[in-house]
Amino acid sequence: ASSSERGLAAASLFLRVLTLLLLIASLVIIVSNKVYAPFSDVVDPPNLTFRDFSAYRYVLSAAVIGCAYTLLVLPFAAIHVAQGKKFGRGRGIALLIFTDVVSAVLIATGAAAGLGLTVEVQRSPHDFDSKNFLNLVDVSCGLMLGAIICTVIMIMISVHPLT
């Protein structure tokens, strides 16, 4: 394999690792994001979590599926770099590109749903102090969008040998 092919494979592997890290960070933020009633002990159940909104549950689901997919594909990307083999033009590369696109769309729709609901909640009057909660949801969705950028670049790298 040429050095440029090896470089593209290494870049793709790096982007997959970065995607995984961004999705894990997004998961940690969305799961740990809670609002407690004023002056209540932390042992009480929180008044507000991602579970209270369907769109935020979808954000979590999209991030979990994105992590699982990335963990599934990561060893193959690492082997590809280690062996320095060309992926080729066959069904394998087509399947990889297709599954990358499906994963990217799922993660993007999850992030968009979370950001969209956050905007709607911010517009409506509410009786709880949700500013920090909603800001953390925005951060979580923003990390997912960062993962999407990495995935789109990976797809472009995967398609490059086919052109």
Image (cartoon, grey):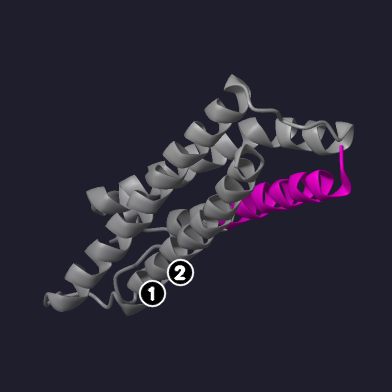
Between residue 90 and residue 145, name the one nearer to us: 90
Q: Is residue 107 left or right of residue 159?
A: left
- The secondary structure type at the circle numbered 2 is helix
Between residue 102 and residue 5, name the one nearer to us: 5
Residue drawn at x 47%, y 37% is 65
The image shows residue 132, relative to residue 47, as above or below, that is below
Q: Do the residues labelled 1 and 2 touch (CB within 8 Å)?
A: yes
Q: Give the range drawn in magenta.
A: 1-22
Q: Rounded to the nearest whole Å, what is the CA distance between mark 1 and mark 2?
A: 6 Å
The image shows residue 98, relative to residue 50, as above or below, that is above
Quarter of the C terminus within the rendering: top right
Residue drawn at x 15%, y 77% is 123
Mark 2: amino acid: Val
Q: Name the residue under label 2.
A: 139
Q: Quadrant of residue 74?
A: top right
Please state the horizontal and vertical placement of residue 16, each as a whole percent of the image: 65, 47
Q: Name the residue under label 1.
A: 135
Q: Residue furthest top?
A: 91
Q: Can residue 55 be found in the magenta stretch?
A: no
